[in-house]
Image (cartoon, grey):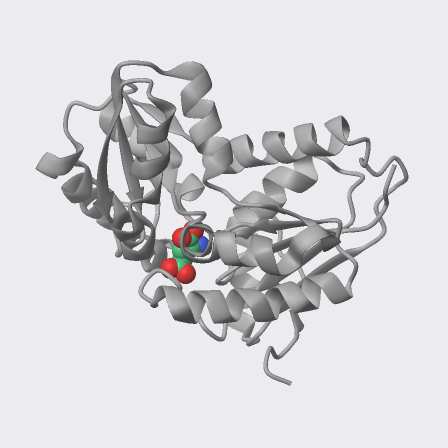
Amino acid sequence: MNSHPIGIFDSGIGGLTVAHAVTTLLPNENIIYFGDTAHLPYGDKSSAAIQAYSIKICNVLLQQKCKVILIACNSASAAAYELVREYVGSKAKVINVIDPVVDYLSAHYTDTTIGLIGTKQTVNSNIYRKKTDGLNKGIALKSLATPLLAPMIEEGFFNNNISESIIEQYLQNPELQDIQALILGCTHYPLIKKQIETIYQNSVTVLDTSEIVAKALKQYLSYNDILNTMNAHIRHFYVSDYTTSFETSTKIFFGEQIHLEHYPLWE
Ligand code: DGL
C-alpha cells in the first residue's frame, strides 16, 4: 500500500484521456496532472526541447512525491523517456505510453501488418517500429504522421463532416493500406476512435492506447503492492499556461470540466 500520487504529464490537455482512463480504472489513486500548455504542441518540437521540458515537469512531480511518473504523451515518450528514466532513477517508476502498447501487440498479434498514426515527432522517431521489430513476431509497422488531427480535436472538430474528411484523407494514404489494426499513437486520438472505426466499417481494429496504458499501470501497482487502498483525496491538474479555453476543453478530454491550476514552469 502506498498513497503517494501518480504523476501524469503531457504537452497539454490531450493527456487527460490517459488521466481519465487511470482515474476510471484506479479510482483510489491520488493524481497530479501536469499539462505543459505553455510549450504545446510537442509534436513539432525537437527532441532536445521536449527533453528539457520533461525534466522540468519531472522536478515538479518529484517534489510532490509521486510514486509513478506516467508520460501521457507519445511525443514525449518517444523523445524523452530514456532520459527521464535515468534522471528520476529510483525516486519514482517512470512509465511511458509506448511500451505498454508494444507489449499488447506482442501478446495479441503475430505475422501481421499494423498501422500507426501520431505526431511528426512520434512517427519520425521510428520508436514504434524499432520496438515492434525487436519483438521478432513478424509484425510489419506502417506509419503516418497526422499533424492536423491534434489541433483539430482541440478545437472541438470531431464527429462532424470536416473531421471526417480530414481523417479519411489520412487513412486513405498509401502508407496505411492493408493493415489489420491501427495504433492511435497520440493521446488526443481516443476522441476520434469511433469515427475511425466507422470509416473502416470495423474491418480494422482500432487500439485505444489510453486504456492499454491504464491497465499496465494497474498491473505494475498491484504487482509491486503499491496500490492506494484508501480513498483518493488529491487531484491537482496543473498547467504551465492558463487560459479559460484550456479549462473549457478539459470537458472533451476528461469527460467533465475540471479546474486547472496555473503552475509556471520556469519560476
Ligand atoms: N499529446 C501529444 C502526443 O501524444 C500530441 C500533442 C502535441 O503535439 O503536443 O503525442
**Identity of the residue drawn at 61% across and 29% down:** 215
**Identity of the residue drawn at 43% across and 43% down:** 191
Left or right: where does residue 32 sit relative to residue 166? right
Question: Residue 70, position in %: x, y?
Answer: 60, 48
Q: How many marks?
A: 0
* Residue 248 in sight in this render: yes
Question: Residue 234, position in %: x, y?
Answer: 81, 55
Frontmost residue, 16 versus 96: 96
Frontmost residue, 138 versus 179: 138
Frontmost residue, 10 versus 136: 136
Left or right: where does residue 166 sit relative to residue 228? left
* Residue 255 in sight in this render: no
Left or right: where does residue 239 sit relative to residue 66? left
Looking at this view, name the residue that lies furthest to the bottom: 267
Looking at this view, name the residue that lies furthest to the right: 230
**Identity of the residue drawn at 12% across and 39% down:** 173
Question: Residue 250, position in %: x, y?
Answer: 56, 57
Question: Residue 42, position in %: x, y?
Answer: 40, 63
Q: Quadrant of ligand 1?
A: bottom left
Picture layout, residue 163 above or below residue 261 = above
Picture layout, residue 57 above or below residue 14 = below
Picture layout, residue 129 above or below residue 179 = below
Quadrant in which the C terminus appears:
bottom right
**Identity of the residue drawn at 30% across and 29% down:** 133
Looking at this view, name the residue that lies furthest to the left: 174
Picture layout, residue 126 above or below residue 54 = above
Quadrant in which the N terminus appears:
top right
- Quadrant of the rendered image containing residue 39: bottom left
